[in-house]
Amino acid sequence: MQGTEAGKPLIKFNHCKRSIYSFRVPGCCPLCQEALGSAELADAPVSISSPFGNGHQEKCSFLFRPTRGTFLREYDGRSDLHVGITNTNGVVYNYDRCGVRRDRAGWEQSLVVPLLQPGMLGLQDQWDRYLEDFSAHEAWLPHRYEEDHHNCYSYSLMFINCILATEGKEQLDKTEFTEKYVVPRTRLASKYITLYRAIEEHGFYMIDHASPEAHPP
Ligand SMILES: [Zn+2]
């Protein structure tokens, strides 16, 4: 379920040979004003799922969100991101200049990467203790924090590498980590944010179908 924190749900429908995105189905097409009640089944509205999730409802996951503000309101594609790891109760462990934080709120609009393969129940049972023991290490004391080299990414990546080692998998370096976990999701999120803000501003957003029989107006 999408709460208000994840933004309003989006829908898409087809009319005037275009895909039209909106927060709700309008009574008539915003382009030609024709009533939409008689839409054919193929043109029936579909809901567009949000790339964001409530991090506090996701267990054993890697999360990221803008350091300041939210994706839908403030993110500009270059904003600093803050990252963390959830335990099995949706508490978000994250490292900053104050040391390891255990957040019970504030990650309601996050990009979420589940870290446990289905069926890894043994690991899930140990997860909270692993995360707590890992976080107690002196590497994560506040004075060790360095904005560029020993930060929230270092903390999450090192924990993910501990999990990968436990599963007998290869370690990730920072570049692989970013390319595999972060970039695909921020790219998807950026498209969604563009769409979302355009609808907020204009009431709808449309794209032309690249269909060969489409005629220019
Ligand atoms: Zn129309």
Image (cartoon, rainbow, N blue to C red):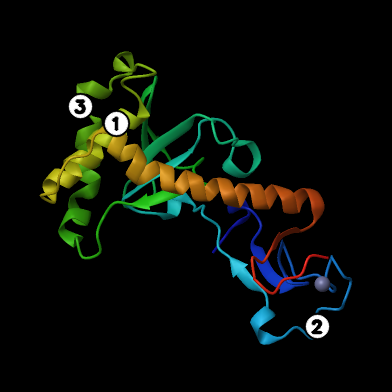
Q: Is residue 140 above or below residue 56?
A: above
Badge number at residue 37: 2
**Of the two numbered discs 2 and 3 in the rendering, the one whose residue sits closer to the viewer:** 2
Q: Which of the 4 quarters of the picture holds residue 57?
A: bottom left
Front-lying residue, 109 or 40: 40
Name the amino acid, label 2: Gly
For label 3, the residue is 137
Could you say whether the residue bearing mark 1 is in a helix, strand or loop?
helix
- Measured in 3D between alpha carbons, the distance from the residue under mark 3 to the one under mark 1, in whole angstroms, is 11 Å
Could you say whether the residue bearing mark 2 is in a helix, strand or loop?
loop
Percent position (x, y) of residue 63?
Answer: 41, 44
- Residue drawn 67% across the image and 86% down it: 41
For label 1, the residue is 155
Name the amino acid, label 1: Tyr
Q: Earlier in the sequence, mark 2 or mark 1?
A: 2
**Of the two numbered discs 2 and 1 in the rendering, the one whose residue sits closer to the viewer:** 2
Q: Are marks 2 and 3 in contact (CB under 8 Å)?
A: no
